[in-house]
Amino acid sequence: MDNRAVVVKLGGSIISESKTKKFSYRGETIASLARAISTSGVDVVVVHGGGAFGHPVAKEYGLSSRSSKPSPEGVSETRRAMFDLNARICDSFMAGGLHPYTFSPFPVLAAAGRKGAKWLEQTIAAGLTPVTFGDVVNVGTGFKILSGDTIALLLSKMLGAERCVFVMDVDGIMGPEGLLRSVEKKDARELKLSPSEDATGGIALKLRDALRMASAGTEVAFVSGFRPAEFSKALKGLSFRGTTVKGPSRE
Ligand code: IPE
């Protein structure tokens, strides 16, 4: 691929009205983001979160980001909810002019060398948008949730992505005086980020992952999904309303 890809993570907060309002889904919003992707000319790989689909069901059955031994029913039901959400996201993507190709992250991430990246690049070159999601993973000793954020981090690394754009329901990361336009590692320690109750850790973990990504050379952007024009600018690497997470300066 001549252009370096951009990984987009659609967070649960933009997918659903609230994580507790089970199976709520913002179809119009997701379709408007799909339109922004399809008109951007940027090569995109999408990862979506669990929102009001994966999280409430995972919680019901005691699944979390730590390995545990949930009931087989819990594993099936949580995955069932994620596949249901994925089908809805694919519908909205098609309504927005994209041709989604849902893939399981596990074989792609497990592929040796550049094999996984090449497979994604060929899928994009065929006119498709690869889409994957946070999922329940068998870790041998039990099952855990692999969050979409972690998958976005691993895929960004594998692809040598130019940037990773986290889409959420607020403009970006909020500090004591409102929106932070840019965050670096040294600022992160001072930020008091509220712990979250979801199955995979919330904004503090998201920021930790983002800082890791930024130090590996992938710029990270946080933008509101309610502002498709700003999302479009973030995709293209233009200045946008939101937060940019920067790695250590490379000069
Ligand atoms: C969670 O993925 C997936 C499951 C609950 C199975 P994420 O942790 O990425 O989801 P969001 O973005 O917080 O909703």
Image: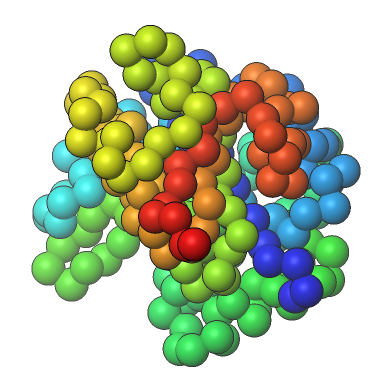
Q: Residue at x 56, y 27 (%)?
A: 242
User: Which color scheme is applied?
Assistant: rainbow
**Is 19 on the left-hand or right-hand side of 63?**
right
Residue 167, given in percent of the width and then of the height, sits at 56, 34
Q: Can residue 91 be spotted in the picture? A: no
Question: Is residue 125 depicted above or below 19 in this figure?
Answer: below
User: Residue 59 at x, y = what percent?
Assistant: 24, 33
Indicate the quadrant containing the N terminus: top left, top right, bottom left or bottom right: bottom right
Quadrant of res 3: bottom right
**Residue 89 in which image quadrant:** top right
Residue closer to the observer: 183 or 112 = 183
Name of the residue lying farthest toward the front: 251
Q: Dividing the picture into quarters, in which one does residue 186 lie?
A: top left
In the image, residue 106 above or below residue 197: below
Q: Is residue 143 left or right of residue 132?
A: left
- Total labels: the figure holds 0
**Who's the residue at 51% across and 38% down the image?**
244
| Residue 225, position as x, y percentages in the image | 62, 26
The residue depicted at 49 percent of the width and 62 percent of the height is 251
Q: Position of residue 169 (x, y in %)?
A: 52, 21
Q: Is residue 243 visible?
A: yes
Q: Residue at x 21, y 44 (%)?
A: 64
Is 55 on the left or on the right of 162, as rendered? Answer: left
Of residues 155 and 25, the one nearer the viewer is 155
Q: Is residue 98 or residue 114 the one in the foreground?
A: 114
Q: Determine whether, in the image, residue 126 is placed left or right of residue 6.
A: right
